[in-house]
Image: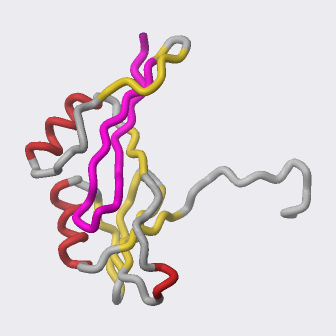
Amino acid sequence: MANTPSFGLSAISQISVTTHDLERAEAFYRDRLGMRHLFSAPGMAFFDCDGVRLMLAVPTDEAFDHPSSIIYFRVEDIQAAYEILRGRGVAFEGTPHVVARLPGRDVWLADFRDLDGNVLALMSEVPT
């Protein structure tokens, strides 16, 4: 199947983010970011991101002990989401800003970090 020319990866099932303090990270994602906690297991906590599972995990090996890739959270109203999260103590790298002007829409981003230094971002495509 993987060698079939029409095969291509598209759906993301789960994303893993490294943490060194699972309890603190779990509270950040649940309470500050308002994400829905699914379940926890030893060294791991799982959240729902509109059908994609986010796993917070304490690294079990040096090979896995590094910051994550940037996770972009889609929001309808980036200004409102920015203000809500700032009100919950989320420290942004800057204010929401346009990164691309495309036909019929502008792409906006606002970057922030979780408590372990992993970069996260809000993303919104605003019709023009």
Q: Is residue 7 left or right of residue 111?
A: right
Image location of residue 63, percent across then percent down: 51, 82
Give the residue displayed 10% in from the left and 50% down from the top.
Answer: 88
Q: Quadrant of the C terminus?
A: top left
Q: Is residue 2 left or right of residue 10?
A: right
Q: Quadrant of residue 39?
A: bottom left
Q: Is residue 78 left or right of residue 66?
A: left
Image location of residue 91, percent across then percent down: 17, 49
Q: In this rendered view, identify the residue nearer to me: 119 or 71.
A: 119
Vertical order, 78 against 59 (above or below)? above
Decide whether residue 17 is among the magenta residues: no
Vertical order, 123 against 42 (above or below)? above
Q: In this rendered view, identify the residue nearer to me: 46 or 93.
A: 93
Decide whether residue 117 is among the magenta residues: yes
**What secondary structure prevails in the magenta region?**
strand
Image location of residue 75, percent across then percent down: 34, 36
Give the residue displayed 20% in from the left and 63% down from the top.
Answer: 28
Give the residue displayed 35% in from the left and 45% down from the top.
Answer: 121
Q: Quadrant of the N terminus?
A: bottom right
Q: Which residues are magenta?
A: 106-128
Give the residue displayed 42% in from the left and 52% down from the top.
Answer: 71
Q: Quadrant of residue 20?
A: bottom left
Q: How is the image coloured?
A: secondary structure
Q: Residue furthest right?
A: 4
Q: Is residue 87 left or right of residue 8?
A: left
Vertical order, 52 against 16 (above or below)? above
